[in-house]
Image (cartoon, rainbow, N blue to C red):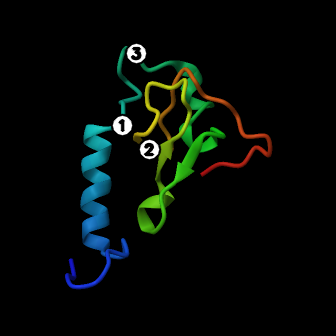
Amino acid sequence: MVSGGPWTGDDRGHNNETHERWLRLLNRSTGAPDYRDEWFDEQCGGCRFWVALSGELGRDWGACTHAASTFDGRVRFEHDGCVSFTARGDGSFG
């Protein structure tokens, strides 16, 4: 990481480490007993309340902004899901 200026999110090593750490700590396994089958089609990246992060991490990660979700205000992997999923009107993803 380069110090001295504002953080731009462009450090590939840092981003890769963050991605792996967040996958391990924040993402639920599709094999977990509480992971619902419908979440394969209702993933966070397709929810109207998921806002992608800027920079490299925004390719896979965003913040949940759905007040009814238990994940409101938390960073979420685009391929995770929750019971509060609300499809985007335009059908876009990510």
Q: Which mark is residue 86?
A: none
- Residue 75 quadrant: top left
View extreme (right): residue: 90
When the figure is inspected, residue 85 is found, relative to residue 6, above or below; the finding is: above
Where's residue 90, x and y in %? 80, 46
Where's residue 30, x and y in %? 41, 28
**Real-space Cα separation, disc 2 to disc 1, in angstroms:** 6 Å
View extreme (top): residue: 33
**Real-space Cα separation, disc 3 to disc 1, in angstroms:** 13 Å
Q: Which residue is mark 2?
A: 77
- Element under disc 1: loop
When the figure is inspected, residue 49 is found, relative to residue 92, above or below; the finding is: above
* Residue at 54% from the left image edge and 29% from the top image edge: 67
- Element under disc 2: strand
Q: Residues within 10 Å of mark 3 (few under 14, many from 20)?
A: few
Q: Which badge, 3 or 1, comes first in the chain's sequence? A: 1
Q: Which mark is residue 27?
A: 1
Q: Which badge, 2 or 1, comes first in the chain's sequence? A: 1
Where's residue 64, x and y in %? 50, 40
> Left or right: 59 with respect to 46?
left
Q: Amino acid at mark 3?
A: Asp
- Residue 74 quadrant: top left
Q: Are marks 3 and 1 in contact (CB under 8 Å)?
A: no
Q: Which residue is mark 3?
A: 34
Q: Are marks 2 and 1 in contact (CB under 8 Å)?
A: yes
Foreground of the two, 55 or 33: 55
**Real-space Cα separation, disc 3 to disc 2, in angstroms:** 17 Å
Q: Amino acid at mark 1?
A: Asn
